[in-house]
Amino acid sequence: MTSIIAGLQGQPPEGHPNGYPFVAGRNNIIACAKHFVGDGGTYRGINEGNTILSYEDLERIHMVPFLDCISQGISTIMASYSSWNGHQLHAHHFLLTEVLKDKLGFQGVVLSDWEALNRLSNPRGSNYRYCISAAVMVGLKHEQFVDDLMLLVESGEITMARIDDAVERILRVKFVAGLFEYPFADRSLLDLVGCKLHRELACEAVRKSLVLLKNGKDPKKPFLPLHKNAKKILVTGTHADDLGYQCGGWTITWYGGSGNITIGTTILDAIKNAVGGETEVIHEKYPSPDTLAGQDFSYAIVAVGEDPYAEFTGDNSELLIPFNGADVISSVADRIPTLVILISGRPLVLEAWLLEKIDAFVAAWLPGTEGAGIVDVIFGDYEFKGKLPVTWFKKVEQLPMNSGDNSYDPLFPFGFGLTYNEEKSLD
């Protein structure tokens, strides 16, 4: 996390006061560490849920990354939607004031999450004045916020010290960021957005994040890398030619979308660019029985996965491959040697019978706009480097599932990932 902060804000000089925000110059931007604190430990992983832990465990497990951020001069920290032992973080005086500000010495701005203020009353926003008094953070009702805040200060329910603290922190970050000297964006930097260098870096990130989970039905006969000069190949599946699906949520809109939502390269585009001039590429989103039965394909590439989601819109108790993905894989693999590329933000159910049918399986996660990064690796121009950052379960009933559990019985264990070198060494 701290390397991201340095990339955004710049590296603080030696001796920079701990806890004070730092922004190196106009080519840097304010960073935000979120969500304070315990957001990743909610009961059963429920979004905006409740983290049930002792303070000692909260500090030992969830607070450590924020200590690193503060030492790197993080400018803002966002409070979590979630609760700690039933008490919502946005109204948690002990954690936000006594711990974050006083004990940890954070001198930047404490931010609220989107409309989090409204969540402090039930129904949401029904007692807006109480919400303001509990958090002193603004929501969308700016005019009402000002009116109610003034009344709460005049009545003494909110002290001037709380107002002064908030204003001091906001001004401190603005001064550090140079907003008073340069209040507007530097438009000379616009050409950097989406530039070739940045897209190449994004492509590199895709190549390094891919995880090879199966390569050949016989370990001594690896299926990958694929041959670029094959006579005819089939490219199919809902995610083979869809930038929106590659990008996932939080892209253009809150929970993302499908189709050509931005500039980029789909998996299909990249395959067409990579194969030899004599190779025929047949693309069907859902392959017809006639296509599968009537043509002599060298191999098939099936790209399936999730539709975009964000936060609770992605809550899913079944974790099956959407859009009949398993059926598409099965129908293709019954006829043609098949590579499956899964586009998803998390492991999905991959039943043993289906895994046995296919020849190779790659977890590509959410590669974003640069689908060429996937194609670079499956054709052997680059090596597989990725390892599983989580355990891949056999069935959802096993969840939650962690490496080291007494009943640990994964489909693929935490840290698993094949490489071409490992596969070839078996020859």
Image: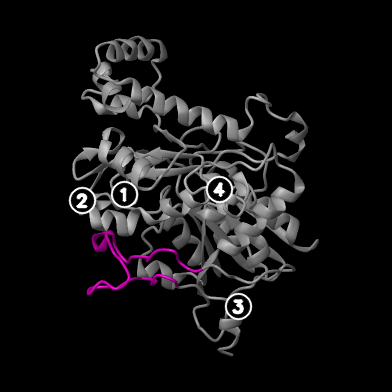
Q: Which residue is mark 3?
A: 420
**Between discs 1 and 4, the one toward the N terminus:** 1
The one nearer the camera, 328 or 389, is 389
Describe the element under mark 2 as helix, strand or loop. loop
Horizontally, residue 95 falls left or right of residue 52, namely: right
Residue 234 visible in the picture: no
**Between discs 4 and 2, the one toward the N terminus:** 2
Q: Which residue is mark 1?
A: 38
Q: Which residue is mark 2?
A: 52
Residue type of the residue flagged with mark 3: Tyr
Residue found at x 61% / y 56%:
235
Q: CA distance from mark 2 to mark 3?
A: 43 Å
Residue found at x 25% / y 52%:
44
Q: Name the mark on residue 388.
A: none
Residue type of the residue flagged with mark 2: Ile
Residue 8: quadrant of the picture: top right
Q: Position of residue 298 (x, y in %)?
A: 64, 69
Describe the element under mark 3 as helix, strand or loop. helix
Q: Which residue is mark 4?
A: 246
Horizontally, residue 350 falls left or right of residue 69, namely: left
Q: Position of residue 249 (x, y in %)?
A: 48, 41
